[in-house]
């Protein structure tokens, strides 16, 4: 957690765990300058995980970063990271169908894109549930860019603590065999 952020290169390849003020816990990885991976450990879509999500990643000013993307579910996400202060602000714009049927999204999205697209067409998308929250960053790991080991397994109870306690990745940021 003592990494200092100044440039965009400092941010790319970084792995974070953070908890929103509403209690929802997320794990997020800046895989490269246009892709993010993440796992959701708490909240209405806990258990959902995604790799290779295209995203817009930019540095607003030294050490402050904005990331935004639209998921195949129709959910829009905007995150503002201030990692030197271990804080971020996120706004999630959930379509009505995700609010009403969150269980449809709780899976490894990449293997269920047809299901996400089908639900997006079948159910109402409006009004959106807007969730603006601040979060505390509780873990910062230097995983390096394009490390497919960072988000490569489904979330389980206690995973964030295992990561924070050094029980999930080895010294080369590869998953420890479980």
Image: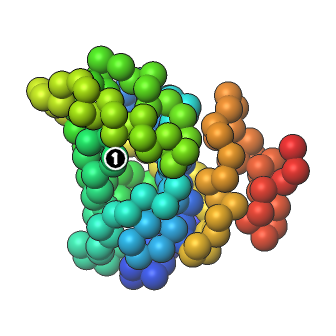
Q: Residue furthest top?
A: 100
SS class of the residue under badge 1? loop
Q: Is residue 86 visible?
A: yes
Question: Looking at the rendering, which quadrant does residue 130 occupy?
Answer: top left
Residue 15: horizontal and vertical position, in percent?
A: 56, 60
Q: Quadrant of residue 20?
A: top left
Nearest the viewer among 38 and 169 is 38
The one of 154 and 8 positioned closer to us in this rendering: 154
Quarter of the N terminus within the rendering: bottom right
Counting from the top left corner in percent of width and height, residue 176 is at 84, 54
Instruction: Where is residue 170? Give x, y as percent.
Output: 82, 61
Where is residue 137 drawn, in percent x and y?
48, 49
Q: Residue at x 77, y 63 (%)?
A: 174
Instruction: Tell me if I can see residue 49 in this picture.
Output: no
> Where is mark 1, residue-wise?
72
Q: Residue at 75%, 46% (x, y): give it.
A: 165
Residue 131 vertical placement versus 75 (above, below): above
The residue drawn where x is 45% and y is 82% is 9
């Amino acid at each position: 957690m003592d990494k200092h952020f100044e440039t965009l290169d400092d941010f790319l390849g970084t792995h974070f765990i953070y908890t929103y003020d509403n209690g929802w816990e997320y794990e997020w990885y800046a895989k490269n300058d246009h892709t993010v991976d993440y796992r959701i450990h708490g909240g209405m879509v806990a258990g959902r995980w995604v790799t290779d999500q295209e995203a817009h990643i930019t540095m607003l000013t030294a050490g402050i970063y904005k990331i935004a993307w639209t998921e195949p579910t129709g959910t829009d996400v905007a995150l503002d990271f201030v990692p030197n202060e271990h804080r971020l602000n996120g706004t999630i714009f959930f379509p009505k169908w995700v609010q009403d049927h969150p269980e449809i999204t709780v899976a490894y999205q990449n293997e269920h894109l047809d299901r996400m697209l089908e639900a997006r067409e079948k159910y109402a998308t409006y009004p959106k549930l807007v969730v603006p929250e601040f979060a505390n960053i509780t873990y910062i790991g230097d995983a390096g860019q394009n490390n497919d080991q960072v988000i490569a397994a489904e979330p389980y109870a206690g995973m964030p603590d295992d990561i924070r306690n050094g029980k999930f990745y080895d010294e080369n940021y590869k998953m420890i065999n479980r």
